Image (cartoon, rainbow, N blue to C red):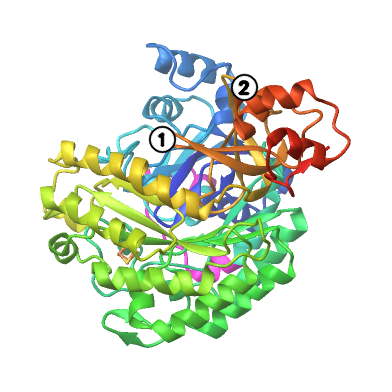
Amino acid sequence: MKVLILDGYVDEPTCLGVPPYVSTYVRYVAGALVDYGLKEKSIDYLTIDELREKLGLKPYIGNNYLEDFSKALNKSFVKNYDLLILISGLTVPGRYLGFTPLAYSELFAISHLKGPVKILGGPIRFGFAFKGGEFALNIEDLPFEFISLGDIEKDVLVALNLLKKQEFFKILKNFRTSEEIDKIAYKGSFILKKHFLYPNIICEIETYRGCERKNHCSFCTEKLYGKPQFRSIDGILKELESLKEVGVKYIRIGRQPNILGYLSLEEKNGFKKPNIEALEKIFKKAYDLKFQVRHIDNVNPGTIFHFQEESKKALKIISTYDTPGDVAAFGIESADEKVIKENNLKVYPEEALKAIEIVNEVGAFKEDKYGEYKLLPGLNFLVGLKGETRKTFKKNIKFLEEILKRDLLVRRVNIRQVMIFPGTKLFEENIKPKTKFQNEFKHFKYWVRNVFDKEMLKKVYEKGTIIKNAFVWEVKEGFSYVKPFGTYPITIKVPKVLPLYSYIDIFIVDYKERSVIGVPYPLDINKEDIRVLKYVFGENLAKKLILNRPFKNKEDVFKILGRKIFEEHIKV
Ligand code: SF4
C-alpha cells in the first residue's frame, strides 16, 4: 500500500504546523501507520506548498484557480497513491511568511480526486476557516471516503480496518488516549526526513491536551478535547530521543494549553498548581539532548497569578534549560473587566500585570552581552468577544500603556479577530465573529503597531543585538526577510539579496516603519555593499567609507565615522 500524507497545515491555539513548524498530527499519523505494520518507505509526505509547486501552480492565482488545480491534480502522480491522508485546519488566524495553508478550493478539488481512498482530518474537524472574523464552514458534505471528526491518528487506523472488510462509514469519530500517543509518537519521527525543509524544521511537542480549567473561555476549542490527557514523562522523553536520532535540531514544547499545567497538582481558584519536578525532567532532557532551540508556547497567566512561588520556580527551570529568545505566550485576550467576566477569561488586568512582572523577574536576562533575552512574555488579544464595547479598545491601550510605564518587557503583542467554532460558548450564544467596532479596532491595531511595538522593540531588540542562525525565508524587492528558528521569532529585514533558505548571523541596526532592520554580522567594512552600509551609518558616511576602502584597522574606520560605533560588530 502506498500512502501519501498531505499536509495542508494546521494552526490551533495549542499547535502550530505551518513551515518551518511540523505539527504533531503529521508525526502521529506516520507513527500510527508504522505501528499498524506499514513500512516507512511506503509512506510519503508532501506539504501543500510543495504540491502546488509540483503541479506548476502558485497559491490562488487567477480566477480559474479551482479548475486549474483540479485539472493538474487529476493528471498528477497523486492519483496513483492507494491512500491519501489530508491533514488541515486553522482554528486561529495567522500570517505565514513564505507559506500558504490549504485553500477551500484546494480542499474541494482534493475531495473530488479519483484514485486514492481519501481521508480528511486534523483540526479541520471543527470546520474549515481561513481567517479571523468568520464562521467555520462545515466539511461533512465533501466527498472524501472518510472524514475524521475524532483524532486523525486513531481514525486512520479505523479506516484501514474498515477498508480491509470493504466497509465504509464516512464519518469517523474515534479518540486516542495519551498512552496510545506515547506508543506511536516516537515511531513517526522518521517522516521528518521527508519534509522539503528538513533539517530546517521545528517540531511541536505535546505534553497534554484539554484544558485543566473547570470553566472554559467562551471562544476556545481546547475544551472540546475534554478533560486533560497528560502524556507520560517517559513517553515524551522517548519521543525527544527519537527526534534527536533523526537529526531534528529545533523543538518547541508547545502543544498544550499551559506548559505550567503539565501533570499539575491541586487546584486553587479554578487554576492548578505547577508540577515542578515533572517540568524539570522534560526540560533537562531537552537540554541534555542539545537541541539547538528549546522553546515553549502557551502559559496561563492565571496559573502564575494564583501560584506565584511555584510558578517562579517552574519558570526558573524553563529559563535555565531553554535557549534565548523564548516566549511565554499569555492569552490575555482583553483588558476590559466586562469582557473578561462575560467570556470567563483567565485574568483581570492587575493579575495579568503581576504575571508579566513575574516572567520578567525570572526570564528577562541575557546570557551574552549582545544576545536575546532568555524568556519574555508575549500577549494575545482577541477582538469580537462577547460584551465588547468601544471602551474595550481604550482599556486595552491603557493596559499596554501601563506595561510601558512599569518598564516591563514584552516580546510581542498579537491581535486576532475571534473565529467561532461549533461547541464553543460563543457559537451557542450566536455571537457574530466580526467586531462591530471596526474603527476602534483599526485604531487599536494602529496604536499597538506604531506606538507600543516601536517603543518595545527598541528595548527588547536594542541596536547591536546579534541574532545567530537566522534563516532566509523570503527575498523580494532587494530585501531579504530572515527569522531565527523558535517560538514567535522576530522577522528582520536585511537590505540585501541573500540566498533563499540559507543561514546568516545578523545584528540589529535600525527600526523603520514596522520593520526591524538587520545587517550581516560581522559587518565587513571593506567588502559590504554600499546599500547595507547606508542602513548602518547613513548615506554620507557610507559613501566616505567606500571612498576610503580598504581599511587596515578599525581605528581608521572610526576616524571616518567620527565616533566608535558597533565596535564589536564590524571587521576590516
Ligand atoms: S484557559 Fe481558556 S483559552 Fe486557555 S485552554 Fe483553557 S479554555 Fe482555552
User: In the rendered image, which quarter contains the N terminus?
Assistant: top right
Magenta region includes residue 256: no
Q: Secondary structure at mark 1?
A: loop
Q: Position of residue 198 (x, y in %)?
A: 70, 42
Q: Position of residue 374 (x, y in %)?
A: 58, 64
Q: Position of residue 534 (x, y in %)?
A: 63, 27
Q: Left or right of 383: which side holds 199? A: right
Residue occupying the point 60% across, 79% down = 280
**Residue 78 visible at all:** no
Q: Earlier in the sequence, mark 1 or mark 2?
A: 2
In the image, residue 306 sits, relative to residue 179, either above or below, namely below
- Where on the picture, by quarter, is residue 55? top right
- Where on the picture, by quarter, is residue 135? top left
In the image, residue 54 sits, relative to residue 317, either above or below, namely above
Q: From mark 1 to mark 2, how far is it between C-alphas?
A: 22 Å
In the image, residue 110 sits, relative to residue 375, either above or below, namely above
- Where on the picture, by quarter, is residue 552? top right
Q: What amino acid does circle 1 point to?
A: Phe
The label on residue 54 is 2
Few, some or many residues within 10 Å of mark 1 (<14, 14–19, 20+): many
Q: Left or right of 458: which side holds 448? A: left
Q: What amino acid does circle 2 point to?
A: Lys
User: In the rendered image, which quarter contains the C terminus?
Assistant: top right
- Viewer-proximal residue among 4 and 271: 271
As drawn, the residue found furthest toward the bottom would be 266
Residue range corresponding to the magenta coloring: 161-182
In the image, residue 326 sits, relative to residue 81, either above or below, namely below
Ligand 1 sits in quadrant: bottom left
Residue occupying the point 19% across, 47% down = 384
Q: Left or right of 520: which side holds 181? A: left
Q: Left or right of 338: which side holds 188? A: right
